[in-house]
Amino acid sequence: MDVIKTEIEGLLVIQPKVFGDDRGYFFESFSMKKFEEKVRKTVFVQDNESKSRYGVLRGLHFQKPPFEQAKLVRVVLGRVLDVAVDIRKNSPTFGQYVSMELSDENKKQLFIPRGFAHGFAVLSDKAIFQYKCDNYYSPAHEGGILWNDPRLHIDWLLPENEIILSEKDKNNPPLCDTY
């Protein structure tokens, strides 16, 4: 696997080695040994998967201390725009984000360390999205940031009238009211 740094410290793109032939392909989606060698020691304790249709936007979500979560995210089927926002209070990149397309074709993964809000928008007819977490989900420590926060200026690559949100995500506060 190749590890590519982004402009935000700790936020990494992981490109697995894919072996393909006329039968299809094979790749190792996760190896704890390689992950620890190339990224950092992390013990993932929970795997999650979601299936969504075109236009669904999930996020921007995070867990408050002491239930912050690092995540390793990838798309099994389809295409999404994945977004990670730095919400680490003392970070020089606080309030900045990285967005990238993750798909079943490019097989890229994104490692999102603790201290980030995360979300994604489905760009294909449907998408299956998987992520590993290094801490358990705690409903009492759940937080969110408004998907269209004017301070962030995130281009979700979808027409606004085609975005599908949960009631909870429609009512998340902007970043300035969160921190």
Image (spheres, helix red, strand yellow):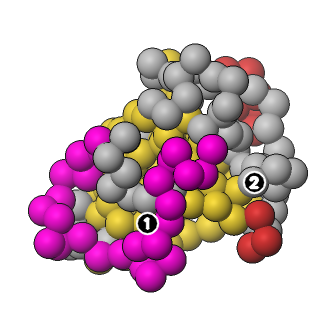
Question: Mark 1 highlights which residue?
Answer: 58
Query: Residue 99: x percent and y percent?
Result: 36, 39
User: Can you tell which of label 1 and label 2 is closer to the viewer?
Assistant: 2
Badge 1 element: strand
Q: Nearer the viewer, residue 95 or 121?
A: 95
Q: Nearer the viewer, residue 21 or 179?
A: 179
The CA distance from mark 1 to mark 2 is 18 Å
Q: Is residue 30 left or right of residue 53?
A: right
Numbered badge on residue 132:
none
> Where are the magenta residues, as a range?
152-179
Query: Residue 9: x percent and y percent?
Result: 58, 20
In the rendered structure, does residue 70 fall within the stretch colored magenta?
Answer: no
In the rendered structure, does residue 172 fall within the stretch colored magenta?
Answer: yes
Image height check: is 73 above or below 58?
Answer: above
Question: Mark 2 highlights which residue?
Answer: 64
Q: Residue shown at 14%/72% (left/top)?
A: 161
The amino acid sitting under disc 1 is: Arg
Task: Tell me the crowding category of disc 1: few under 14, some 14 to 19, or many 20 or more residues within 10 angstroms, Cα based.
Answer: many
Q: Quadrant of residue 56?
A: bottom left
Query: Residue 146: x percent and y percent?
Result: 44, 59
Badge 2 element: loop
Query: Residue 2: x percent and y percent?
Result: 50, 23
